[in-house]
Image (cartoon, grey):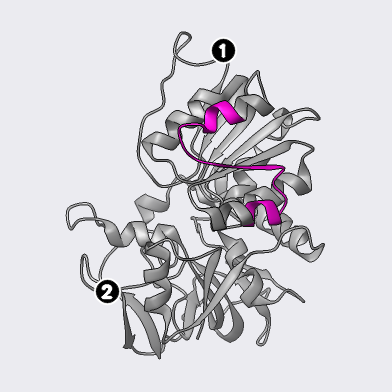
Amino acid sequence: MRALQYREIGAAPELVEIDTPEPGPGEVRLRITAAGACHSDSFLMSLTAEQYGYGLPLTLGHEGAGVVDAVGTSVTGVAIGDSVAVYGPQGCGRCYHCAQGKENYCERAAELGIAPPGLGAPGAMAEYLIVPDARFLLPLGDLDPVQNVALTDAGLTPYHAIKMSLPKLVPGSTAVVIGAGGLGHVAIQILRAITPATVIALDVGEEKLALAKEVGAHEAFASDASAAEKIRGVAPQGVQAVFDFVAIQPTLDLGHAVVAVEGDHVVVGVGAGAVPAGILAAPYDSTVRAPYWGSRSELFEVFELARKGLVKVETEVFSLDDAPEAYRKLHDGELRGRAVVVP
């Protein structure tokens, strides 16, 4: 089969021919119908040899959807021909967090060598994918896999981040979304769908700001030196939640400058930086959180939002042959929303 692999530190991913995998006991093989490209992949491929720890070669793609093509022995819960999406942050299934469906916070994944597809295990940027357990497969039903595959991360990650702040996003509240790209434009829709908050979007690109307004942001400001003042013009006492999908020092500083007393500063992006903490360094009882992905039950909820037409991912579709170009455009910031590869 064909697969897009990261094969050399610092090099672009390559389309290669590898053996088609066969499912072992308890495993499910999918014929991939769609795979999403994510900034996490770009981040992974930017790491130095000393920082990188995901194994080479690595088939990319942690957002995956497909049709059940073959099953190993003892598999129940799915049937040949089922259209499914893959839950990416896979865990042991037995620890306290996994028992709640929060496999994104599995206590033993590192110890047991369990890694998400495309982030240590073979991913979905291929014609076929082996899924280690049927519990990681959620039925898509009538949802189009190409239009909705990105919800497995670009929908689930912001949904989880926002859901934890729901008690603060009451009538009269304000939420700020920093970065209106792949995850941010979905976050805006989720905020509009499940909260009454006024939503302010920030980005450095005019096209992303236009997209933010299209998908429901009440305000869209350039993420520059004037952004904090503009936000304070809307919310003089500060905002109840900041969702930072960039997470570099300038955006972290901006979020810190506008968060209110008892507000949430939620750092979702994979950038690096520091946020001041302490009774004299931040508004009283404000919090800083760094959530990761989301639970299996939350992915069901995200798909329900999509079925009701409340969340839609802006997608640009590429063939597997053109997948390296999708990653180039992702790296260079040329995508309006999310890149989806169809084998």
In the foreground, 286 or 225: 225
Q: Which residues are magenta?
A: 211-230
Instruction: Describe the element under mark 1 as helix, strand or loop.
Output: loop
Question: At which x and y percent is residue 194?
Answer: 77, 45
Residue at 81% x, 30% y: name it. Answer: 171
- Residue 11 vs 320, above or below: the answer is above
Residue flagged by tag 1: what amino acid is it?
Answer: Tyr
Question: At which x and y percent is residue 174?
Answer: 69, 31
If the image is split into quadrants, where does the N terminus sit?
A: bottom left
Question: At which x and y percent is residue 279?
Answer: 48, 9
- Residue 301 vs 147, above or below: the answer is above
Whether 172 is among the magenta residues is no
State left or right for residue 251 relative to residue 16. right
Whether 229 is among the magenta residues is yes
The numbered disc on residue 96 is none
The numbered disc on residue 284 is 1
Tell me whether the residue at label 1 lies in contact with that at label 2, contact meaning CB atoms closer than 8 angstroms. no
